[in-house]
Image (tube, grey):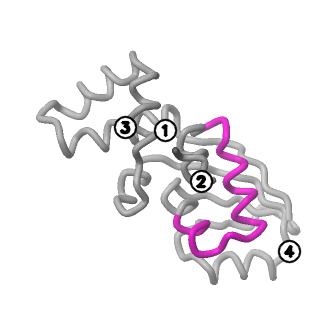
Amino acid sequence: MKLSLIANSPDMETMIATSMLTTTSGAMPSTLYDRLKAKPEKVADIVGRVEVQHGNILEHNRLVWRLEATRDEVLEIMLKSKFFNITEAGPDTWVLSCNLRTIAEYHQIHPDEFSRELIESIKEAAPHVYGFIKGDKE
């Protein structure tokens, strides 16, 4: 099985931080987003406090991968989680998509090779969430 990230929502961690702050701030989400966009260090601080129990904050994004796998491997993924969207793109080639919440929850329940590949694939797109999911959180 081979997984390659081909697209993702921009500014995922800024959106997550905005989502986190909307529950405690009276400011409009667009105002919070603009403030956070200008302060990446603040985004890192806020996202560093993410908790999977409040997984809805990890839903404000989308990631898309090219997956090279057999039908049986894809079926196994689909049976383990209904939150992956998978479309056949050719022989043993699939387009897979989900959000960060799906990755975090899948990894908690199924820490398998597919899970590890998913996590490694988000390292650049969402470095602080990557660290949290991997268990590098302080």
Q: Quadrant of residue 122?
A: top right
Task: Tell me the element at label 3.
Answer: helix
Nearest to the observer: residue 63 or residue 22: 22
Q: Which of marks 2 and 4 is nearer the N terminus?
A: 4
- Tell which tag, 2 or 1, sits nearer the viewer: 2
Residue 13 lies in magenta, yes or no? no
- Tell which tag, 2 or 4, sits nearer the viewer: 2
Residue matched to label 3: 17
Tell me where the magenta segment starts and ends, as one range: 105-125
Inter-mark Cα distance, 2 to 1: 19 Å
Query: What residue do we see at 73% from left, 71% from top?
Result: 112
| Quadrant containing the N terminus in the rendered view | bottom right
Inter-mark Cα distance, 2 to 4: 30 Å
Q: Where is residue 115 in the image (x, y as percent from the top left)?
A: 69, 64
The answer to whether residue 131 is left or right of residue 23 is right
Inter-mark Cα distance, 1 to 4: 30 Å
Check disc 3 and give the amino acid type. Answer: Ala
- Tell which tag, 4 or 3, sits nearer the viewer: 3
